[in-house]
Image (cartoon, helix red, strand yellow):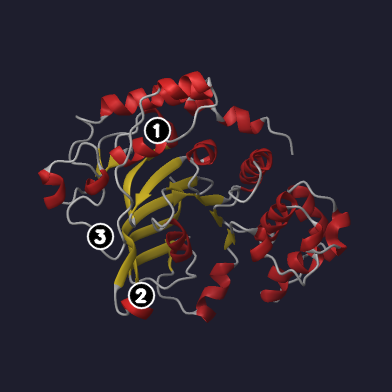
Amino acid sequence: MNELLRCEELRRTFTRRGLLDGTEVVAVDRVSFRLGVGETLGIVGESGCGKSTLGRLVLRLLELSAGKVLFDGDDISHLGPRAMRSTRRKMQAVFQNPFASLNPRFSIRQILEEPYRAHHLSPPAGWNARLADLLEQVGLDEGILGRFPAELSGGQLQRVAIARSLALEPKLIVADEPTSALDVSIQAQILNLFARVQQRSGVSYVFISHNLNVVEHLSDQVAVMYLGCFVETAPSAYLYARPLHPYTQALLSAVPATDPVVERSRAAVTATEEPPDPSRIPNGCRFHPRCPIAEPLCSEHEPNLRDIGGGHQVACHFAPERTEEKGRSIAAALAVRHRQPPVNMQATIARAPL
């Protein structure tokens, strides 16, 4: 693998204010991963599990409490704002809500020119040619350059946000829930756009989402995050065909079926109780208070993320011996719900029109 990004033991804590002044909250804890050139890492998990914080640590929009970020061969873990300027040209972000991430007082032309002006650059081919090219890449007409964000739909605005992220030809884009604010039909178009951009430019993605279907369609590798830690990582095809951690199984079981007969007949894996307060992380396995197969061992010893072959890692005392059969049955049910094998669903997105 031609490595672009390496994160080692990333950790980020926050201190609560107000009535709980001084309480430490661990948002990201000992997270490590690697990302190759032109690859996509999908990160999934419930709201509040630390996904967005992790994305901001990668981009150095937040300071690390501990750990190391190496990007394009350089250690950027503790670079100051001035030293980060040249690196920021190579790493960009697409956020969840384009209505919030785009300046409503700027025209689309000003929004697309902003990255160049921030870095004191001008496009070699000239402004009009470059802006038209950016809009063409995301399926928009240059006639919108004089319009303002309030005059465009959510899908159009997200395309503008993607175009802005491409302006400086970055090597890495961190996409944080980029489709969750959009209609389902528009989601497929945006996913198709991300795939086309990657094929054309070779950009790498860290793609953050709570939607497992979205992550499956786009990712080479998938990491499942719970209470600040990765509990399972694997190549996308492996994870969806053989989910091994009880938390991953619970997430996949929650994917609804469009066929009511299939929905009624499926055997779901449920996680009991609500997620714990991140300021009171349980001892041992973090998932054990909600796990259907937990035993006393789970509350006493925290399992390490260990490789079980093929690049598949899982943090569970009983995987794969006691979890593999359930995982395969969930994968089979998921395939029935989609009416095709989960690992082949990329073709569905590829056919979505722009």
Between discs 1 and 3, the one toward the N terminus: 1
Tell me where residue 146 sits by quadrant. Answer: bottom right
Between discs 3 and 2, the one toward the N terminus: 2
Going by the numbered disc 1, the residue's amino acid type is: Ser
Q: CA gap, disc 1 to disc 2?
A: 34 Å
- Crowding near the residue tagged with mark 1, few <14, some 14–19, many ≥20 C-alpha atoms within 10 Å: many
Going by the numbered disc 2, the residue's amino acid type is: Arg
Q: Which residue is mark 2?
A: 16
Q: CA gap, disc 3 to disc 2?
A: 15 Å
Tell me the residue at 78%/53% (across/down): 135
Report x, y in % for residue 143: 88, 55
Where does the N terminus fall, quadrant-wise?
top left
Tell me the residue at 35%/29% (across/down): 242
Along the viewing direction, whichever of 64 and 321 lies nearer the viewer: 321
Report x, y in % for residue 152: 79, 56
- Crowding near the residue tagged with mark 3, few <14, some 14–19, many ≥20 C-alpha atoms within 10 Å: some
